[in-house]
Amino acid sequence: CEEKVVLFSQSTGGLSVAIAMDTFPHKISVAVFVAAFMPDTKNSPAYVVDKFSQSAPPKAWLGTEFVSYGKEGVSMYTSSSKEDIELTFLLKRPAGSLFITELARREHFSEERYGSVPRA
C-alpha cells in the first residue's frame, strides 16, 4: 500500500512515535511532536527522559505511579500524610510507561530511518 500515516505525539508519547519512525520510516508522512519528548540520533533514546527527570522538581512527580515495563512497580510519594497517600491510591490513574531500562539498551535512532521522517 502506498498510503502513509501522520503520527501525533504528546508528552512521553514522543518516545513511542520515535520508535515507530525508526522502525517504519517508509510508512510515515510526518511525525508531529506537541510538547513531547523528541529524541535525537546522537544520544541514547533514554537521554531525553534522563534530562527531564534531572530538571523536574520532586513535586512534578507527585501522584505519578512509576512502573517498570512488564513488572510490578513502586509508587513514589514524598512528604505526604498517610491519609493523603491513601486518597492518592484511590484517585490515581495510570501514567504512560517511560520504559527507561529498555530505552537505555536500545541502539541510537538512525539518521537513515528516524532522521528521514519529517518532524513538526
Image (cartoon, rainbow, N blue to C red):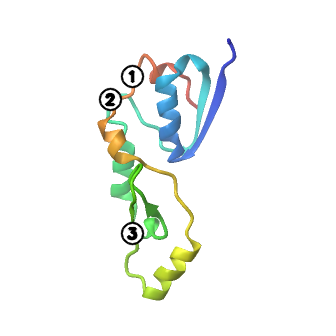
The image quadrant where one finds the C terminus is top right
Q: Residue at position x 39%, y 69% from top? A: 76
Residue type at mark 3 is Met
Judging by the rendered image, the residue that carries numbered circle 1 is 110
Give how far across and how far down residue 109 sits, in percent: 39, 27
Give how far across and how far down residue 101 sits, in percent: 33, 45
Judging by the rendered image, the residue that carries numbered circle 2 is 107
Q: Residue at position x 32%, y 34% from top? A: 43
Q: Residue at position x 45%, y 65% from top? A: 60
Let me know if residue 98 appears in the view. yes
Q: Distance between the Cα atoms at labels 1 and 3?
A: 34 Å
The image quadrant where one finds the N terminus is top right
Determine whether label 1 and label 3 are within 8 Å by CB: no
Judging by the rendered image, the residue that carries numbered circle 3 is 76
Q: Residue furthest top?
A: 2
- Compared with 32, 93 (above or below) is below
Residue type at mark 1 is Ser
Query: Nearest the camera: 94 or 56?
Result: 94
Q: Secondary structure at mark 2?
A: loop
Q: Secondary structure at mark 3?
A: loop
